Amino acid sequence: MTRTPLIAGNWKMNKTHLEAQALVEDLNDALTDHDFDAVDVAVLPPFVDIRTVQTVLDAAKSSIGLGAQDISQHESGAYTGEVSAAMLKALNVTFAAIGHSERRQYHGEDEAITNAKVKAALGAGITPILCVGEPLEERRAGKHVEYTLAQLEGGLSGLSAAEAKQVVVAYEPVWAIGTGEVATPEDAQEVCGAIRDTLASLFDTDTAQAVRVLYGGSVKSSNVADIMAKDDIDGALVGGASLKADEFAALAGNAA
Ligand code: 13P
């Protein structure tokens, strides 16, 4: 089973729509056909930038994929401030990050919410990028694998194997996010391998082999190749290094 690697740039709360336009234009210019032959590349801008970025990507007939950083678990109605799967789908959004550690930490998102959001995304034909990963205390206590797998099981609860196959899982240890402290390739592989084993036991081997498992946390152009050399790591969810077109294109190039 060959899995096409995915390099996804999570812009977090950065870039006005004007800055977003410039960034995605520069990124599209910097990426080559060779990159796109080898890896899928996507950007996850803030909601208010998505329409602008979509317009640029459409006009350029770009191969860059478009994602959102979150999605509502509700279909429509009185949910002030929320953005629905149908709204995102109408803007050609094909990915949605779900359960990012910053959503879990600052917005109280738990397994019930991530699970509902995964289902909402799948229901609209949007690929969920389910984010899992342990805080520093759990790592220090040696509980990082079980903590992360509990988030995985909760997020995928009630899915069929066919649905689970469409999910992307991103392992992002909280202590490595935005800190410059990258997990070693061995640390990342330990958990990503455990994620794949768990997918096999929750669903089946076929599903486990099909699902893309990404690593995230201080990934840069200089370390992505070593991380992705590991068997169970199929790409990266990138924060800071996705905010500069040259660096993100170099990162995608090194992943390719
Ligand atoms: P950094 O790459 O800035 O550490 O962020 C990782 C992340 O949280 C991506 O979702």
Image: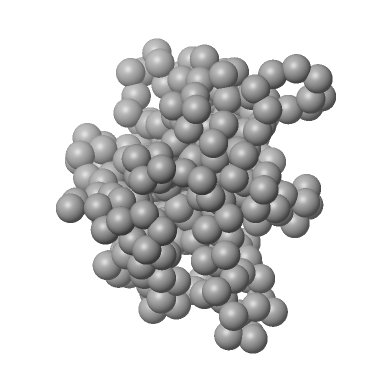
Task: Tell me which corner region of the image, top left, top right, bottom left or bottom right, holds residue 154.
Answer: bottom right
* Left or right side of 108 for 76: left
The residue furthest bottom is 141
Residue 251 visible here:
yes
- Identify the residue at horizontal 19%, vertical 51% (top origin): 2
Query: Where is residue 178 shown, x and y percent of the image?
Result: 62, 61
With respect to residue 131, does 77 lie above or below? above
- Identify the residue at horizontal 59%, vertical 45% (top origin): 115
* Left or right side of 9 for 227: left
With respect to residue 150, does 87 lie above or below? above
**Which residue is at the front of the view, 244 or 183?**
183
Query: Where is residue 26 shown, x and y percent of the image?
Result: 44, 32
Query: Where is residue 206 shown, x and y percent of the image?
Result: 25, 53
With respect to residue 39, does 78 lie above or below? above
- Identify the residue at horizontal 51%, vertical 20% (top origin): 89
Residue 102 visible here:
no
